[in-house]
Image: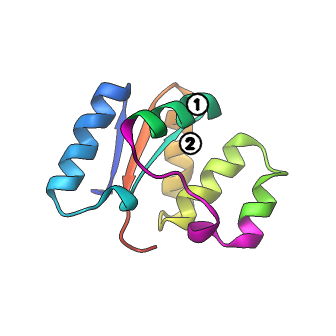
Amino acid sequence: MDNVKIVENGLEARKEIDLFMSQGYTKDEIYLFAHDHNRSEHLTDKLDINDVGVGEQGIFEAVANVFRSRGDELRSKLESLGLSAMAAERCEEEMDHGKVIVLASKSV
């Protein structure tokens, strides 16, 4: 999973974002995930990168996420960006331990 990085904090996330951008990804192709919704929003805003929305997931998945647990929602979003179910599960487990996921995807 070269396009997925697991980091501890916003500073490490910034380094990975800069690295992805040096590899040709744009800000619109880089996503950040954290288990805590507020932390995810804060880091996404602060680091000026994307949040997964209807365009990436499709309307039905976006609506379904309203009724899912946070873990299920995160796995669904990760899978919508091209991760396998197993990889999405592994990332979600890391987020359970306070880690942040930075993902670059040109597949959307």
Residue 56 is inside the magenta segment: yes
Residue that lies at the very extreme toward the right in this rendered image: 67
Q: Is residue 22 magenta?
A: no
Disc 2: CA contacts within 10 A as few (<14), some (14-19) or many (>=20): many
- The dot on residue 96 is 1
64 versus 39 height, above or below: below
Pointer 1 with pointer 2, Cβ within 8 A: yes
Q: Position of residue 72 (x, y in %)?
A: 70, 49
Q: Secondary structure at mark 2?
A: helix
Look at the image and give the residue range highlighted in magenta. 47-61
Residue at 16 percent of width and 59 percent of height: 23
Q: Quadrant of residue 107?
A: bottom left
Q: Amino acid at mark 1?
A: Asp
Residue under the image location 25 percent in, 42 percent down: 16
**In screen coordinates, is 54 left or right of 19?**
right
| Mark carried by residue 92 | 2
Name the amino acid type tagged 2: Glu
